[in-house]
Image (cartoon, helix red, strand yellow):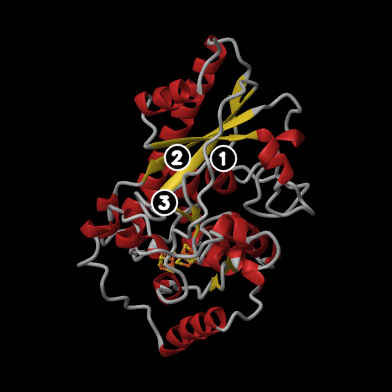
């Protein structure tokens, strides 16, 4: 008898994954998140039969820290840990006689889109593997950790029984809108995100900052101006980013910190209750979204097949969900 899905999931947990799910490559090939730029296993290898998604939580204590560098640093540690776990799962699958490798989770496929668009959308893979659904701000939401988690996946030739996709909405939705209220860049849209606006805060020392400081050095007309541009404080941030990725990726924890979904939220409910970034404009934007949803208006973020990853059945409070209603 070949390897079973249960054996792979158990191995993933033993190796350190917090959650493990499996989906079939066929389902992913048939449901690309954006059909114009398909992030599907078939474009990586036609031999892939199953994709194993793993989730690792971000230790919730980090979101109580006043110094954001703590969250950036922990994010990077979680991502590195992910890579190790996924690599070991791929090795295990190969030892069992199957071809397997992990995705480069944080890479961008430049021939498709610019910025944060990988060969596979790991969030969508995790959703197809039954681990969660998308939130209002398009983070991956799980019942266990809300959006305070990362995901990556392993592609394999092993034919493993897939997990059923969730049809309920894990995110509370428009009536909550706490992510929108907290967002310093006003980047949270109605089941969408303004990635460029988000990057101004969440990737303060990312590639855009790098271009800007180089442009300043190149445009300087005198040696003195050039030296001023070189001694710009931004370079220190970029240096730190190159050294430890701190400041270059995942800088802004606000939409993760304030989200009330997740069994881990009780550690945060007290300290995150008030949202200092909340403004009357953000409050109105959330209310307008709730009104539009209730009225059944056309919402771009929910159009077409997108509802598949948000949850066709809508939101159920935990008590009703646990009671099976
Ligand atoms: S990461 Fe920060 S800037 Fe980006 S959507 Fe979340 S709260 Fe807004
Ligand atoms: S803060 Fe509220 S609206 Fe935003 S993702 Fe979490 S549950 Fe959904």
**Which is more toward the observer, 285 or 308?**
308
- Residue at (50%, 65%) from the top-left corner? 314
Figure quadrant of residue 154: top right
Other residues around mark 2 within 10 Å, as few (<14) / some (14–19) / many (≥20): some
**Which is more toward the observer, 309 or 56?**
309
Image position of 276 with respect to 133: above or below:
below
Distance from Cα at disc 2 to Cα at disc 3 = 17 Å
The N terminus sits in image quarter: top right
- Residue at (57%, 44%) from the top-left corner? 128
Q: Position of residue 52 (x, y in %)?
A: 54, 32
- Which numbered dot is residue 308? none
Secondary structure, mark 3, is loop
Closer to the N terminus: mark 2 or mark 3? 2
- Residue at (52%, 54%) from the top-left corner? 167
- Residue at (53%, 43%) from the top-left corner? 126
How many numbered dots are placed on residues in this image?
3
Closer to the N terminus: mark 2 or mark 1? 2
Q: For residue 174, say whether it is visible.
A: yes
Image position of 293 with respect to 238: above or below:
below
Q: Nearer the viewer, mark 3 or mark 1?
A: 3
Q: Is mark 1 within 8 Å of ligand 1?
A: no
**Can you tell me which quadrant of the image ligand 2 is in?**
bottom left
Q: Position of residue 198 (x, y in %)?
A: 54, 66
Residue assigned mark 3 = 142
């Amino acid at each position: 008898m070949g390897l079973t899905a249960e054996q792979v999931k158990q191995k993933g947990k033993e190796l350190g994954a917090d959650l493990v799910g499996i989906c079939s490559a066929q389902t992913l090939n048939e449901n690309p998140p954006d059909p114009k730029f398909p992030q599907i296993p078939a474009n990586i290898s036609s031999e892939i039969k199953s994709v194993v998604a793993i989730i690792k939580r971000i230790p919730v204590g980090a979101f109580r820290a006043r110094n954001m560098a703590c969250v950036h640093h922990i994010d990077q540690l979680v991502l590195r840990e992910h890579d190790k776990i996924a690599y070991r799962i791929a090795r295990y699958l190969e030892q069992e006689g199957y071809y397997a490798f992990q995705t480069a989770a944080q890479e961008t496929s430049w021939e498709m889109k610019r910025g944060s668009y990988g060969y596979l959308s790991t969030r969508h893979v995790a959703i197809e593997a039954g681990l969660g659904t998308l939130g209002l701000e398009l983070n991956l939401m799980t019942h266990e950790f809300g959006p305070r988690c990362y995901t990556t996946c392993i592609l394999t030739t092993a034919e493993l029984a897939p997990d059923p996709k969730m049809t309920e909405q894990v995110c509370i939705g428009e009536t909550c809108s706490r992510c929108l209220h907290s967002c310093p860049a006003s980047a949270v849209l109605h089941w969408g995100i303004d990635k460029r606006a988000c990057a101004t805060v969440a990737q303060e020392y990312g590639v855009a900052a790098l271009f800007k400081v180089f442009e300043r050095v190149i445009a300087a007309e005198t040696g003195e101006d050039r030296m001023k541009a070189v001694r710009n404080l931004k370079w220190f941030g970029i240096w730190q980013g190159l050294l430890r990725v701190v400041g270059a990726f995942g800088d802004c924890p606000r939409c993760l910190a304030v989200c009330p979904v997740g069994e881990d939220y009780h550690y945060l409910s007290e300290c995150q209750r008030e949202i200092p970034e909340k403004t009357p404009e953000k409050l109105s934007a959330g209310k307008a979204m709730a009104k539009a949803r209730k009225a059944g208006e056309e919402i771009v973020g929910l159009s077409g097949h997108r509802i598949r990853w948000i949850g066709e059945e809508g939101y159920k409070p935990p008590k009703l969900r646990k009671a099976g209603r």
